[in-house]
Amino acid sequence: DQQVKQNSPSLSVQEGRISILNCDYTNSMFDYFLWYKKYPAEGPTFLISISSIKDKNEDGRFTVFLNKSAKHLSLHIVPSQPGDSAVYFCAAKGGGSNYKLTFGKGTLLTVNP
Amino acid sequence: NAGVTQTPKFQVLKTGQSMTLQCAQDMNHNSMYWYRQDPGMGLRLIYYSASEGTTDKGEVPNGYNVSRLNKREFSLRLESAAPSQTSVYFCASREGSGASQPQHFGDGTRLSIL
């Protein structure tokens, strides 16, 4: 049973426009959510996170929105740049003291010049 | 500024062979993790070590063993490799204090088992 779902395997946007990546989860015990970015042949790198007690977190061009009632979060990238082309993973941390993450399958973002 | 270093980067094994994947971090982090990533899949947790001297199973531990050698090093061992263990393996570390501290990943080991 997949607890973190990224239903879009890929997304293509034009440079300068907004990219919106979506993530749904099923486990109401998740209390922290993260987005990681991954380039080919490299490890994932942390991008931005949000606690379950918040509904928005912003860091430069990146904003994460959390809708707890819908069990949905999204990552907005504005404006999108060609260097943003990568696979984006949504991850969720279960409640409690053990820091274990459950990852989605990822969305390949392509930003076209 | 090395961060998390994984060795080797690539390896080909025959079914039944054994191998140890090495991971070292230089950030003085308390927690370390091993994941595998298969095509079209997210990262799945194999084992983790919340602190030096402790290890726990993750989502997919069967066929693997781990050793937290010291605070810096966390190794993953395949005792008898199987083709189903062909994957990219990622090691990660985390400071361990507070949910806002993210995991930092190495660049992975690509393992093929024939």
Image (tube, rainbow, N blue to C red):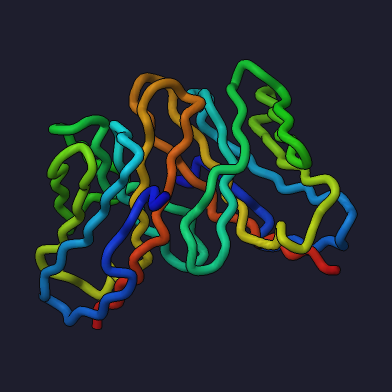
- Total labels: the figure holds 0
| Relative side of A35 to B41, left or right | right
In the image, what residue occupies the spot 83% across and 61% down?
Answer: A13
Q: Which of A72 and B88 is in front in this view?
A: B88
Quadrant for the N terminus of chain A in the image: top left
| Relative side of B66 to B7, left or right | left
**In the picture, residue B15 is in which quadrant?**
bottom left
User: Considering only vertical position in the picture, is B57 above or below A54?
Assistant: below
Q: Which residue lies furthest to the top in this view?
A: A53
x and y percentages locating residue B95 in the rendered image: 37, 31
x and y percentages locating residue B20 in the rendered image: 16, 62
Q: Residue furthest front?
A: B1
User: Considering only vertical position in the picture, is B46 above or below B103?
Assistant: below
| Relative side of A16 to B52, left or right | right
x and y percentages locating residue A78 in the rendered image: 83, 45
In the image, what residue occupies the spot 33% across and 56% down?
Answer: B5
**In the picture, residue B18 is in which quadrant?**
bottom left
